[in-house]
Image: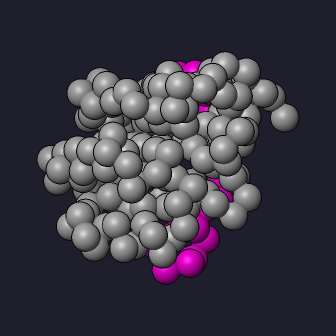
Amino acid sequence: MVERPGAFTFIDQACTLIGPELKVGDAAPDFHVIANDLSTVTLADSRGKVRIISVVPSLDTGVCDAQTRRFNEAASDLGEHVVVLTISADLPFAQKRWCGAAGVERVQTLSDHRDMSFGSAYGTYIKEVRLESRAVFVVDSSDKIVYVEYVPAAGQHPNYEAALQAAKAAK
């Protein structure tokens, strides 16, 4: 497995990300994560749609909360051909509780806690703390990555507008 030392800063500590650094034009790797109802979700489950994949360390932190709410608000303007997935290593029960408390209904929260399948495939698995790093991917309907942003530090926001524009332009 590829390791990228110092690729992400978490609480002022340089951390190692496990997995490849994906680029625009790459085929989107498959993954299996857990939905709030404990069912398994894969990339293929949203085949034929444009996907915004918003990756956060934990929904119970300020920037992660804001990131997920921002994409939830934007989702209604994106049309039926775009889905927004938020992936973290939070337990599915915690994700469900957070969504209910936050009123988030347009974003599907998915847990990678079981085996870090998504994090290992997309290069967002933080080795030292077994969480996801902050990142945003846009995957088109043919499973090609059309936008990638690996945010370098946990306390920084992603470029929301760039990700949303990429999703709007994708087919």
Question: If the image is split into quadrants, where does the C terminus sit?
Answer: top left
Is residue 114 visible to the viewer in this orientation of the structure?
Answer: yes
Query: Where, by quadrant of the figure, is residue 96 drawn?
Result: bottom left
Q: Is residue 32 above or below residue 139?
A: below
Looking at the picture, does residue 35 appear above or below residue 128?
below
Main SS, magenta residues: loop
User: How many numbered dots are placed on residues in this image?
Assistant: 0
Residue that protrudes farthest toward the front in the picture: 12
Judged left or right of residue 149, residue 160 is left
| The furthest residue to the bottom | 37
Q: Is residue 112 left or right of residue 161?
A: right
Which quadrant of the figure has residue 80?
bottom left
Q: Split into 4 quadrants, where in the image is the N terminus? A: top right
- Seen as rendered, the residue at the extreme right is 1
- Magenta residues span 23-42
Identify which residue is drawn at 28% across, 73% down. Answer: 100
Above or below 102: residue 10: above
Please give the name of the residue rendered at 32% of the width and 58% of the height, measured from the top-left corner. 107
For image coordinates 54% across by 67% down, the residue present is 91
